[in-house]
Image: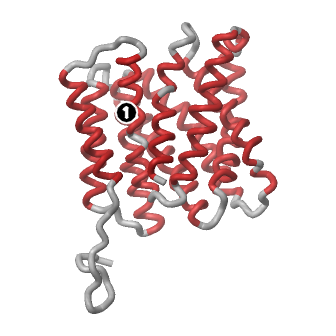
Amino acid sequence: MKLAVIGAAVLWGTAGTAGLLVAGVDPVSMAAARLVIGGLVLAAVTGPARLPGLPRGPLAAAALAVAAYQLCFFAAVSRTGVAVGTVVAIGSGPVFTGLLSWLLDRVRPSRRWATATAAAIAGCAVLTGGGGEVRADGVLLALLGGLLYAFYAVTAARTISAGAPSDAVMGLMFGGAAVIMVPVLLWTGTGWLAEPRGLLTALYLGCATTALAYLLYGRGLRTTPVATAATLALAEPAVATLLGVVVLGERLGAAAVTGLLLLGAGLVAVSLPERVPPAGRDGRAIGSSA
């Protein structure tokens, strides 16, 4: 089911290009509309309210984290620039996810995962470039965003691993986030949604890059370790970059090509199945520290 996670990342990667179809819109307003529409569609399609066995407390906290992530990300970008804010927020997500999995579930990340994740994060950093004024508060907000992402991803993965339907988990989590983000959408303005292009863009962002993407991501979490899924999700900036070249006519320099190659190598490495060591006399896997 790693392909489902990669499919979700591909959809996420189209969001930036789609958002450029509407000029002059507050990015926070667009993000809020995306989450409100996507969350409500997910909740309507999956019908989580008909599944009273779902653990509402942890998923409610995860819904709050989904909404808070959006605010932290845009606040970080406004303070320290798009490149640095994006690298820190997206790049720290897999690291925090691996650490939370280790802390909560005693699932120690493999050496190959650590190496592949480091290569993928380095690729993201090179791909998006440096630049921007690096402010400590912006970096801290981006790191908080990465932690929030890790929290809701790990919460969803643990709930799904316990036997809950992945679709219902995502529906409850993002449906709750949609309700939280309604005041943000109203506060930032909805006038742009009255324009046909604005409405169509918001519908695509909500239905495709949120509802469908997180349905795929949730199904991928059924069999893919959440730390691995978080690293695979780093395909998002690669897709966004390639769309910029193909659709928007942007050009890639040598550094961007190097970043794509690093990112691609990391994603390929983390996608390959782990080799299971043969068991020793005591039944433990040789080389295992368990």
How many marks do you count on the picture?
Answer: 1
Identify the residue at image location x=27%, y=79%: 278
Identify the residue at image location x=22%, y=19%: 253
Q: Quadrant of residue 160?
A: bottom right
Residue 186: percent from left, percent from top: 72, 21
Q: Quadrant of residue 113?
A: bottom left
Of 218 and 103, nearer the camera is 218
Residue extending farthest to the bottom is 281
Of 288 and 150, nearer the camera is 288
Helix, strand, or loop for circle 1? helix
- Side of 132 where 47 appears, left or right: right
Identify the residue at image location x=64%, y=13%: 198
Tag 1 residue:
139
Identify the residue at image location x=30%, y=91%: 282
In the rendered view, tell whether residue 249 sits above or below residue 125: above
- Side of 81 where 71 appears, left or right: right
Does residue 179 appear in this view?
no
- Side of 134 where 89 appears, left or right: right
In the rendered view, tell whether residue 222 sits above or below residue 143: below
- Kind of residue sitting beneath label 1: Val
User: What sort of colour scheme is used for the picture?
Assistant: secondary structure
